[in-house]
């Protein structure tokens, strides 16, 4: 059967896993080398408060700087990392890099901000996920309430005890939980409260349709209202113009992220933006 991997309708079929292509095998061996040679790093995309325009968080996004092929975006290697299980060590190193940068900014005199890190279902299926998060927080002397983990709704279809235990344990640590690409997955709403979700991220496809399309507005408004009623934070993803940002401000959307505000930045540029602010 086919299984959804990331966005843009990219599918990996199980027969591709059984008979991997030469390209896949080469990329996988390159990925193993990349981990060893420290070719994976993260960029940071600012998230602002819609009303104050202050940067309140940064989302860490992985980048692979391949020696020959240049930058390989996550959609091209995260599915492979998931299939191979490499996502477990990769994910841990991303969280550590993100927390390390967050602590460095604090040491450099900047106000603390949340750091958001994407987590794959494969990572949550690992027994020791929560334990490793706890160790990372302790090693880097980071505060759990300034870390937000982004998961997708589809994770809930699995309904696996290991996933649920890991989520409960990271919530018990005080780490925040966010639902990425909200509105595109298959889910019941009950789990939002059951899992004590802190944040909903409105998928960029709905924001793209705002404010010109009725459906785009209807879905965006509904997600904002849902978040308000359930006392959750709400972030609009993929804000690309001032009309969209204005619309979101009028609808009471709390936070926003997107190219109009800032593209993902390397750490030095991110720091500069944190110092001088947006505008
Ligand atoms: P995501 O978590 O939903 O991240 C948002 C993606 O949208 C990022 O793509 C970002 O660069 C892009 N984006 C930001 N603003 C805009 C905008 O205004 N317009 C448009 N069209 N796009 C915008 P990126 O960095 O290529 O990441 C793609 C996906 O790969 C992420 O989607 C996430 O699901 C996954 N990913 C990225 N980093 C990691 C990671 O460290 N671990 C895991 N497991 N997955 C990751
Ligand atoms: Mg995300
Ligand atoms: Mg995503
Ligand atoms: Mg997203």
Image (cartoon, rainbow, N blue to C red):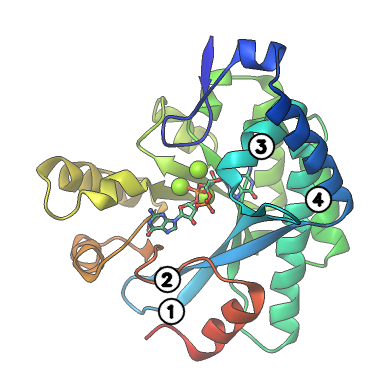
Q: Is residue 157 above or below residue 61?
A: above
In whole angstroms, how far apart are the C-alphas of marks 1 and 2? 5 Å
- Disc 3 versus disc 4: nearer the observer: 4
* Callout 1 touching callout 3 (CB < 8 Å): no
- Disc 4 versus disc 2: nearer the observer: 2
* Callout 1 touching callout 2 (CB < 8 Å): yes
Return the disc, 4 or 1, that comes first in the chain's sequence: 1
Find disc 1 in the rendering and name its residue: 54
Q: Residue 198 in the image: x percent, y percent?
A: 50, 50
Q: Residue 100 in the image: x percent, y percent?
A: 77, 68
Return the disc, 4 or 2, that comes first in the chain's sequence: 2
Q: Is residue 38 above or below residue 6?
A: below
Picture quarter with the C terminus: bottom left
Which residue is nearer to you in this view: 134 or 86? 86
Return the disc, 2 or 3, that comes first in the chain's sequence: 2
Which residue is nearer to you in this view: 1 or 102? 1
Find disc 2 in the rendering and name its residue: 48
Q: Secondary structure at mark 3?
A: helix
Total label count? Answer: 4
- The numbered disc on residue 168 is 3
Return the disc, 3 or 4, that comes first in the chain's sequence: 4
Q: Residue at x 41, y 82 (%)?
A: 278
- Disc 2 versus disc 3: nearer the observer: 2
């Amino acid at each position: 059967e086919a299984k959804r991997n990331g966005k843009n309708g990219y599918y990996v079929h199980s027969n591709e896993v059984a008979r991997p292509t030469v390209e896949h095998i080469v990329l996988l061996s390159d990925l193993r080398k990349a981990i060893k040679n420290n070719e994976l790093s993260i960029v940071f995309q600012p998230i602002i408060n819609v009303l104050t325009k202050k940067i309140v968080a940064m989302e860490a996004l992985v980048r692979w700087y391949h020696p020959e092929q240049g930058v390989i975006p996550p959609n091209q290697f995260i599915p492979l990392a998931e299939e191979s299980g490499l996502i477990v060590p990769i994910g841990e190193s991303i969280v550590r890099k993100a927390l390390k940068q967050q602590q460095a900014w604090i040491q450099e005199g900047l106000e603390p901000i949340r750091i958001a890190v994407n987590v794959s279902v494969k990572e949550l299926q690992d027994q020791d996920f929560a334990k490793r998060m706890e160790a990372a927080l302790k090693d880097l002397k980071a505060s759990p309430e300034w870390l937000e983990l982004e998961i997708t709704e589809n994770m809930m279809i699995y309904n696996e005890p290991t996933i649920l235990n890991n989520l409960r344990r990271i919530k018990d640590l005080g780490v925040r939980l966010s639902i990425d690409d909200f509105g595109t997955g298959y889910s019941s709403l009950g789990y939002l409260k059951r899992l004590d979700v802190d944040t909903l991220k409105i998928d960029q496809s709905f924001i793209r349709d705002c404010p010109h399309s009725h459906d785009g507005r209807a879905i965006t408004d509904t997600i904002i209202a849902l978040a308000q009623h359930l006392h959750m934070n709400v972030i609009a993803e993929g804000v690309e113009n001032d009309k969209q940002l204005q619309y979101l401000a009028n609808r009471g959307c709390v936070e926003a992220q997107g190219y109009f505000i800032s593209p993902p930045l390397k750490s030095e540029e991110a720091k500069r933006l944190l110092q001088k602010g947006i505008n």
